[in-house]
Amino acid sequence: MYKPEIGKEEEEEILKVVRSGWISSASPVVREFEEKFSNYIGRRYGVATSNGTTALHLAVTALGIKEGDEVIVPDLTFVSPVNVVLYNKAKPVLVDIEEENWGLDPEKVRKVITDKTKAIIVVHLYGNPAKITELKEIAEEKGLYLIEDCAEAHGAEYEGKKVGSFGDISCFSFYANKIITTGEGGMCITDSEELYEKMQILRDHGMTKEKRYWHEVIGYNYRMTGLQAALGLAQLRKIDNFIRRKREIAKLYQDLLGDVVIVQRDPPKGKSIFWLFSVFTEKRDRLVEYLGLNGIETRKFFYPVHVMSPYTIFAYEKRFDISTKLSSLGLNLPSYPSLTIEEINYISTKIKEIIRN
């Protein structure tokens, strides 16, 4: 389904760190990766973490979200942004998405804001940028924090600006199937020096910088290793090539399949990175089976959060029409950068066979 692109450059960066002996989170390479990645997105500060979920939890905790607070989250997402709200005993408020960009519907967000609402978590789903400018305006108007979950959208843009450059804190994942990878790993980025300092302390067991082994808050071990950061540095040098290739693959799929299924395209005002190129068809389940029999691995869209038993009590809307629709019809196709034209043609031919028959 997805293959990370790892070559000689990554090997050389990792070997440098191994030979230096600085393999832990104390490695200066971690700081270098934080600086270069946050600069790539256009932010001042980066705090590397052990994975994307810990990045989200670090953000929620640094913003002081606690029991009694409400946080607005999308109903169609990987479950991490919902879980991190619950980790802090706050209440996730599930809101339907909109069909153009696949992100939180700004008008529906407005309707669920209460005096308990503390933050909005925006997810840029499958590489598609959400309507982040509109959501940022709502957050500023209502005095709410804005957290961007950019785990699937490194380098995507909305109105000419990279996603991750809008939130009070923006969070990324570097899992093995992401645009760039550190194997596992994540990062919080921000323009706030205060939040940056706070997240560094929370990430490192709550230890103060002035007095070693002195803890004034309860923190976590959410650190990234030097080995991971070395891999990330090499990957970051290639990110624009990866994105260019992902968009080339998307264009090929669009041209080959646009007349038989609904294909993912750039949303209004946005530039997608087509993380996992997606199509929509009422024959989705039959298509999954047929492609599997022909050696093609695919992945169905996430389930709507509100249908899963731990989260049904947070479904404040009566209907989630769009998240339910996209979840039932959506399918992710192979789209890793080394995918060949011959492979794309083969996949597209098999899709046409089952759809037309």
Image: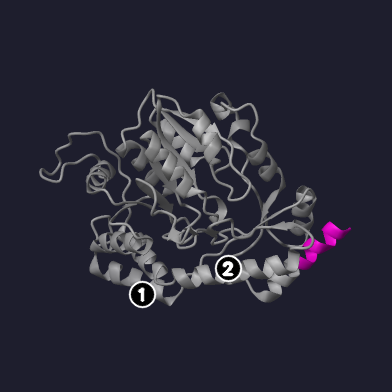
Q: Earlier in the sequence, mark 1 or mark 2?
A: 1
Q: Which of these two is toward me, 151 or 346?
A: 151
Query: Under tag 2, what secondary structure?
Result: helix
- The picture quadrant where one finds residue 36 is bottom left
Across and down, in percent, residue 196 comes to 26, 48
Query: Under tag 1, what secondary structure?
Result: helix
Q: Is residue 117 magenta?
A: no
Residue on which the image places disc 1 = 12
Q: Quadrant of the N terminus?
A: bottom right
- Distance, label 1 to label 2, CA atoms, is 28 Å
Q: Give the magenta range.
A: 348-357
The residue sitting at 28% across, 57% down in the picture is: 44
Q: Is residue 258 visible?
A: yes
Residue on which the image places disc 2 = 247
Relative to 233, is 354 on the left or the right? right
Across and down, in percent, residue 144 comes to 38, 36
